[in-house]
Amino acid sequence: MTDFRILLIIIILTSCSPKTKTNLDLVPLIPIPNNTTSGGTSFVVKEKTKLSFDKSNKDLKVISQNFREVWNSVTSYELSLDQARSEILIEIDSSKVTDEEAYTLDIKTKNIKITGASSKAIFRGIKTLEQILRLQTLDTPLIIPTGIISDKPKFNYRGAMLDVARHFFSVDEVKKYIDLMALYKFNFLHLHLSDDQGWRIEIKSWPNLTEYGGSTEVGGKDGGFYTQSQYTEIIQYAAENYITIIPEIDIPGHTNAALASYPELNCNGKATDLYTGINVGFSSLCLERGETFKFLDDVIREISLLTPGPYFHIGGDETDSTSEQDYLVFIKSTLEIVKKYGKTGMGWADISKAQIPESTLIQYWSRTDKDSIRNENGIQEVLMGIDKRANLVMSPANLSYMDMKYNDSTKLGLTWAGIINIKKAYDWLPENLIPRNKNQILGIEAPLWTETAENFEELTFLAFPRIIGYSEIGWSQSSQRKWIDYKERLAHHGKLLKNLSIVFYESPMIDWK
Ligand code: TNX
């Protein structure tokens, strides 16, 4: 036998033993965990692995069942649940709570343990284990490096927004998006459910909103809408992934789909035509119409009843066709309705001009492509909101709008807020965007407007990989975030996405593995 063959056999024999030298710290996890201590050995994935959990806890049961599916598909082995002498243990331990999402993932050669103060925390830990598995699939048999990860989020609000109004996306597509968000530890999905081009959620007391107002989309193809039971299905699916749905009904502008569906909502009593273009700022609800607030009350009541999450988003952006005076009345009154139905109001930063209750959630979006705090209009509004004791979610258009092009020649996307390449999307700090009251920032949200995204592939092309960077901005400590290091880790996620058949932008800035 040649030396080379002997060497090969030695490598094969030693490569899969628990003694193989490993380094947990080098697994390219995103978001990067707060603390990782490498054990240097490995847990070898075997044909029969068992996972146990407290049977009386139904949330842990759901987490375990879902993880079993991941395990089985990634490893091609069967994970069995609820066995006495298990190798994987998930356990709620509220004795050392630091954050409700904080978890510890302890990987030893013979067993793996995930602990946290709540099922939410366990879920975040499970997703770290899932990423390790998905990133290690090159090794057969599969090994998991030993060590301890102790982790918690920087921000309690780590969101993404999906515009299902400009182009409609089906329940299954939204679920797929939720799966990906969960893998990267997002916890809020904001659904932009109405706009000029389409009304996407069934309102039983105003059925024409969806029957007619939901019938088309940008470009003129058939639109679509979620029935109330489909909306509930999305909410439940998101909840299993520890993601809270935030519904947005954008008022008083961005309302053409409603105005086309009901003549009585228009000042002149005439329904508008359906709209399939991409202009903004031309529609407005009519303050003088008696029906307008009945309409808003019904819509907010029906949706709030279906929505367990704390927030209701009222939009409030780009209202060029509403007088300033009317705008202030609209926002104040609509937030009162939101409050009446038990929700905390949320809105684009423009609403800060109006009378807003304390703790309203203001979404900063900025109107220009300047990325400094000198940026005039956007920041001024945010400061007004801050002074009214609003909380903030940061979605600067020039840094976090996933519908902006990656470079001048990207086929999809818009450019009004600039070009956002992978580095630009990653390399910023939310707290640097405002000059004061930084502790009012609850987190960040990455919006995906869909004027140019017609289908799921186009949607994920715009979102990925930028959204992966936003997950790290939201979760990881600023001191741990370095572009040079992130770029190396991201390089491994291309294969992970390909294994999941997710279309993404293969940026030349990344040396994809
Ligand atoms: C601005 S940002 C909008 C949306 C558009 C988006 C396109 C904001 C609150 N409104 O109506 O879809 O730009 O990038």
Image (cartoon, rainbow, N blue to C red):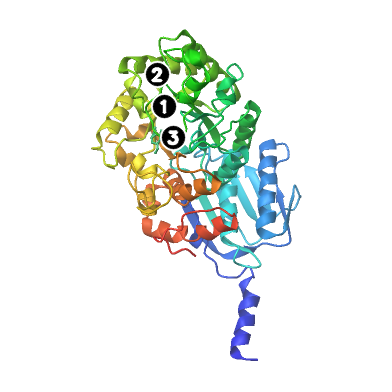
Above-or-below relation of 426 to 202: below
The N terminus sits in image quarter? bottom right
Distance, label 2 to label 3, CA atoms, is: 26 Å
- Crowd class of label 2 (few under 14; some 14 to 19; many from 20; radius 10 Å): many
Amino acid of disc 3: Gly
Of all residues, the one furthest to the bottom in this rendering is 1
Residue beneath the point at 61% across and 67% down: 139
Badge 2 marks a residue whose secondary structure is helix
Which mark sits nearer the N-terminus, 1 or 3?
3
Residue 315's spot in the image, x, y percent?
Answer: 43, 27
Q: SS at mark 1?
A: strand
Who comes first in sequence, dot 2 or dot 1? 2
- Please, what is the three-letter code of the amino acid marked with disc 1? Gly
Judge the density around disc 1: few (<14), some (14-19), many (≥20) Cα neighbours within 10 Å: many
- Position of residue 251 relative to residue 150, above or below, is above
Check if mark 2's residue and mark 1's residue have beta carbons within 8 Å.
yes
Circle 2 residue: 331
Q: Is residue 117 visible?
A: no
Say which mark, if any, is on residue 277.
3
Residues at circles 1 and 3 in contact by the CB criterion of under 8 Å: no
Asked whether 375 or 269 is in front, the reply is 269
> Residue 180 bears which disc, if any?
none
> Disc 2 marks which amino acid?
Ile
Question: Secondary structure under badge 3?
Answer: loop
Q: CA distance from mark 1 to mark 3?
A: 24 Å
Say above or below: 334 vs 385: above
Q: Nearer the viewer, residue 304 or 9?
A: 304
x, y (%) of residue 363?
A: 39, 31
Q: Which residue is mark 1?
A: 347
Determine crowd level at label 3: few under 14, some 14-19, many 20+ residues with C-alpha closer than 10 A: some
The x, y position of residue 17, in whole percent, is 64, 70
